[in-house]
Each structure stands twice: as C-alpha cells, then as structure tokens.
Image (tube, rainbow, N blue to C red):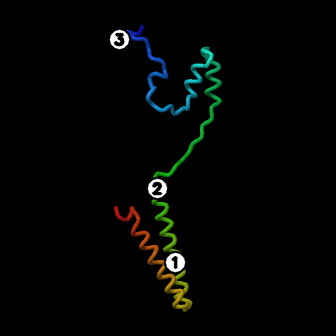
C-alpha cells in the first residue's frame, strides 16, 4: 500500500516504460529480475554493474557531413588554382589551361549547388 499514489501498489519497473524502447536492451531488467524469480544480491548487482563496458559511438550530424563535403570541394578548387598558376607560369599548353579552367568551373558550379550555399 502506498498513500502517495492513492493507495495503489507500485507498478513494476517494466510496466512504467512498457510503451518505450528499452535503450539498455534488457540489461537492467535482467539484472534486477532473473528468469528463475530469484532477486540477485547487492553484491551480484554491484559486480554486474562494475563489469559493464561502454563504447562511445560518435556520428556526424548531417550538416557536418555537408560541411566536410564542402571543405573537400574547396580543397579541390585550391589544388586546381595552384596547378593553373604553375601551368601559366611555365607557359604550359593552352589545352591544359583549358582543362583546368573547365575543372574549376565544374567545382564552382558544384559548390554553388550545395544546400549550404543556398541558405
């Protein structure tokens, strides 16, 4: 009997979150309630909790992925410009100059069409 909740018996842990996804994949529930109905001792719970391993997984937010892609495009523009300077200073062929100019136009068009530029 619990007067704090109108005299109702406390709900089991699993019932409180029955409609929510178990982010622990049942580890906590299995720790507190065994299949054979025996409740584990404090020492067993302590040992189980202190032997857990946690792995941190870092994922990129979609906007960060776009930024990285944009940075890669800017890097390609820089490489094209550097090579174009070298070709022009060494009196390179007009064909190679035209190739670099075309590549630069493609990269700039690609950058212009990204979502980040259009915001």
Q: Which residue is mark 3?
A: 6
63 vs 42: above or below = below
Contact between labelled residues 2 and 1, with CB atoms less than 8 Å apart: no
Secondary structure type for disc 2 = helix
Instruction: Please report whichever mark, 3 or 2, sits nearer to the chain's N-terminal start.
Output: 3
Q: Measured along the vertical axis of the image, is residue 9 above or below residue 107?
A: above
Frontmost of labels 1 and 3 is: 3
SS label for mark 1: helix
**Mark number, residue 64:** 2
Residue 64 lies, in percent from the top left, at 46, 56
Q: Residues within 10 Å of mark 3 (few under 14, many from 20)?
A: few
Could you tell whether 19 is left or right of 28 in the image?
left
Q: Quadrant of residue 53?
A: top right
The label nearer to you, 3 versus 2, is 3
Disc 3/disc 2 C-alpha distance (Å)? 50 Å
What's the distance in space between the residues labelled 1 and 3, CA to CA?
74 Å
Marked residue nearer the N-terminal end (1 or 2): 2
SS under mark 3? loop
Relative to 9, 32 lies left or right: right
Residue 26 place in picture, x, y as percent: 56, 28
Q: Which of the 4 image quarters holds residue 116?
A: bottom left
């Amino acid at each position: 009997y619990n007067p704090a909740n109108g005299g109702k018996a406390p709900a089991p842990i699993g019932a409180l979150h029955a409609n929510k996804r178990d982010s622990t994949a049942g580890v906590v529930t299995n720790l507190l309630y065994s299949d054979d109905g025996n409740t584990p001792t404090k020492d067993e719970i302590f040992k189980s909790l202190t032997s857990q391993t946690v792995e941190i997984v870092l994922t990129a937010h979609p906007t960060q992925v776009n930024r990285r892609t944009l940075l890669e495009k800017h890097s390609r523009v820089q490489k094209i410009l550097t090579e174009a300077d070298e070709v022009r200073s060494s009196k390179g062929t007009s064909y190679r100059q035209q190739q670099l100019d075309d590549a630069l136009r493609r990269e700039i068009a690609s950058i212009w069409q990204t979502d980040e530029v259009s915001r």
